[in-house]
Amino acid sequence: MSDDEKERTVELHHEGGTLELPVFTGTEGERTIELKPLLGSTGMTTLDPGFGNTASCSSKITYIDGDAGILRYRGYPIQDLAVGSTFVEVAYLLIYGELPEPGKLKEFSDKLRENADIPNDMGTLIDALPRNGHPMALMSSMTNTLAGYYEDSTDPGDEEQIELATIRLMAKLPTIAARIYRNSIGEAPIAPDPSLDYVENFVRMTFGDGRVDGELGELFHKAVDLLLILHADHELNCSTATVRVVGSSKADIFASIASGISALSGPSHGGANQAVLEMLEDIRNSGVSVEDYLERVKNREVRLMGFGHRVYKNFDPRSKEIKELAGQILDRHDNPEELFELALKLEAAALKDPYFTDRKLYPNVDFFTGVIYRAMGFPTNMFTVLFTLGRLPGWIAHYREQLHDPAFRIARPRQHYVGSAERRYPGQG
């Protein structure tokens, strides 16, 4: 942080005296106390479980105001991007910092098309993996393996190699994901089609030609594009923080992204939309009413999945667009998803209940995504893979930004030790 960002200082009074700690002000007025001098001056550290009050870096990528329900990528409100942009354009924005001019967007899109194929040997390797293995485990493994196939793009100190790796990751992960899915259902892989755009190509590689066409098919493509946009970045969540921590060791970008995939695979992070679907299925199968289920939630007998957020204390700004799109898809579906109707009833009942509104428990982005994915034909174990494809440009952006941070250093959190005091080994004193 530069001196001209410094607004003032705060004083910490401790047994040894007084320590002045610098305070910095961010773009939107948020204030941050720098603790770098603390240990050296006082011999003390801070204890912050889950890093809920700790900013580990300065970033220009994403701004969130959880109380106001604000999410912006590079300054652009998520609502504007959801309505007017495409995932490829948003990916460019996150990675390079500005919206692309038409020529630059075409160049970027063309590079993604040209690099979508994977090596034959790699395809054989994917085919040899357990077909009943969880797709996230396979995705993480294959992302790591890309470093072995593309050693010419693994040096974090080489700008050209980082750029090449960026294109390869963005281009090849949808191909890998689709092949993993095809193997899981015993179907032959479908090669990428360079004449199609990014999302259309992924849907075709996953489901094949002509599975859904017409207005519903267009809505499916729109849904995938929108869901990828809404998941593209979310500041320093668990998986993004993991990418930065691994990348801080100067690990290559493939290893760092693979670590993010592993972090995202946890049910408390990327598996939330699957948990919502399982909750709705439980309500349906048990025959309990929505009102009775909410009473059970209030009695702490069960959890209400898809409501509330670690950051947002208001409506999740991503949830409105998702809900509207889910309604459009299911209105035009030959076999409308009954769980969507159940979700609507559950949402309406919860929002009328002071127990939930007083606690600021509003629907988040995960509440309707699982219903959309299911309507499209994705099995529940692929939901987090789709999250991965959406979050990919955000991970890449954070990895690249970190490399140019003047304060860049290897991550090394401290601990508060509460174990045994010194003990002597028997016979040694």
Image (tube, grey):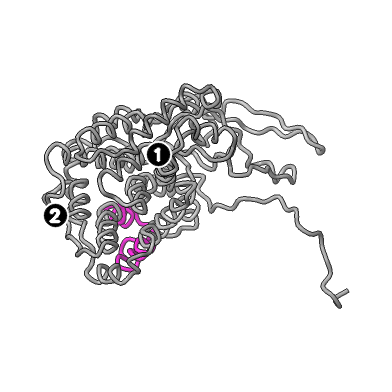
Q: Position of residue 85 (x, y in %)?
A: 24, 33
Residue 237 circle label:
none
Residue at image coords 47%, 46%: 269
Q: Which residues are magenta?
A: 141-167
Element under label 2? loop
Q: Position of residue 418 (x, y in %)?
A: 75, 53
Element under label 1? helix
Residue receiving disc 1: 366
Amino acid type of the residue tagged 1 in the rendering: Asp
Mark 2 crowd level (few <14, some 14–19, many ≥20, 10 Å Cα): some
Q: In the depicted view, which residue is nearer to us: 141 or 188?
A: 188
User: Taking the image as drawn, is residue 111 in sight?
Assistant: no
- The residue lying furthest to the right in this view is 429
Q: Position of residue 249 (x, y in %)?
A: 50, 57
Q: In the depicted view, which residue is nearer to us: 207 or 288?
A: 288
- Give yes or no for residue 68 being in the magenta stretch: no
Residue at image coords 47%, 21%: 352
